[in-house]
Amino acid sequence: MDVLSDAVASIRLGRPHSAIWDKYAPWGARFEASSGAGFHVLLRGSAWLVPGREGTEPIALAPGDIVFVAHGCGHALMSEPGAPLEPFELEPDGTWPRPPERLPDVAAGEPPAAVLLCGAYRLDRARAHPLLSELPEVVHLPARVGAHSSLRAAVELLGAELDDPKPGSDTIVSALLDTLLLYILRAWWLGERQGAGHPTGWAAALADPAVAAALRAVHADPAHPWTVAELGALGGLSRAPFARRFAATVGSPPLAYLTWWRMTTAGRLLRSEDTPLRVVAERCGYASEFAFAKAFKRQFGVAPGRYRRGRAA
């Protein structure tokens, strides 16, 4: 497993939601803060996104622009600054409201001022990966000719499925939404690497061959009894230089990160599977269920069995 895929899988919950919305000026929608994350793609027309944090400048959106609200912060979309806002509310079961039936422009009398493709993801932020925690409040990916071709293709496929559902569309839409999330994150991380002369944090970690090799190894096999020297050797570095470089970019020493990832993996297994505790312990690198339970309680504050029961409630 690669680090980005693992980071997303560790916090994703349930099924994502999406819809295409036609908006006629003047229009405005207010999205309250949530524990999830969401995106908006302007397919046609113009719009403004106003982040919820006071003092943040509005963002003008052009056709093809993508914005990703990474941390579930409240925000608004509108035809122009100052337009009246209507609250966007989920259905009682937590699903998105069904948008009004889309009418041909001729039948509607005039074309919509904006056509938006919007989506939302449910997340468990209890142990959000630091790679995702570093994201800004709003990730803005302006449309540029030749940029992010895979991301654009995913948007087109998703829009086509939502616009004209066919047998199998429910599964296809769900898979495309997960794919779109990874493409958005990949596009931002690549932009961070290329746009900064000296990237820092996780942008630097993923760009550093030695650190990236160690991260891939830990994520591929968290049960292995890794040593700092062994991880450093994967990237051709001796123990001390590797440990300094890893800590400087990732933010924690190699073995501390290994323990954190083992526990995060254990939490995910307990949350989503009925795997026996003995097997969970083995898959996370612990020789005994007792040693695993002790380490787990130190990290989560509760025993594994109680954690599993609490998540199932």
Image (cartoon, rainbow, N blue to C red):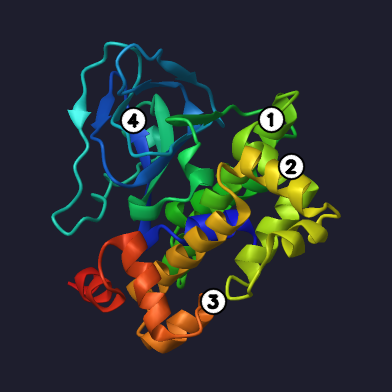
Give the distance between the C-alpha atoms of the residues marked 4 and 2, in whole angstroms: 41 Å
**Within 10 Å of the Cα at label 3, are there few (<14), some (14-19), or many (20+) other Cα atoms?**
some
Q: Which mark is residue 23?
A: 4
Q: Secondary structure at mark 4?
A: strand
Q: Please, what is the three-letter code of the amino acid marked with disc 1?
A: Pro
* Residue for badge 2: 207
Q: Residue at x 20, y 48 (%)?
A: 90
Q: Earlier in the sequence, mark 4 or mark 1?
A: 4
Q: Nearer the viewer, residue 181 or 210?
A: 210
Q: Where residue 148 appears, x then y in whole percent?
A: 68, 40
Give the distance between the C-alpha atoms of the residues marked 3 and 2, in whole angstroms: 27 Å
Q: Earlier in the sequence, mark 1 or mark 2?
A: 1
Q: Secondary structure at mark 3?
A: loop
Q: Nearer the viewer, mark 4 or mark 3?
A: 3
Q: Earlier in the sequence, mark 4 or mark 3?
A: 4
Q: Secondary structure at mark 1?
A: loop
Which picture quadrant has residue 151? top right
Q: Earlier in the sequence, mark 1 or mark 3?
A: 1
Give the distance between the C-alpha atoms of the residues marked 4 and 3, in whole angstroms: 53 Å
Q: Where residue 58 appears, x then y in whole percent?
A: 40, 15
* Residue for badge 3: 285
Q: Where residue 179 appears, x then y in whole percent?
A: 56, 56
Q: Please, what is the three-letter code of the amino acid marked with disc 4?
A: Lys
Q: Is residue 148 visible?
A: no
Q: Please, what is the three-letter code of the amino acid marked with disc 3?
A: Gly
Q: Please, what is the three-letter code of the amino acid marked with disc 2?
A: Ala
CB-based contact (under 8 Å), mark 1 and mark 2: yes
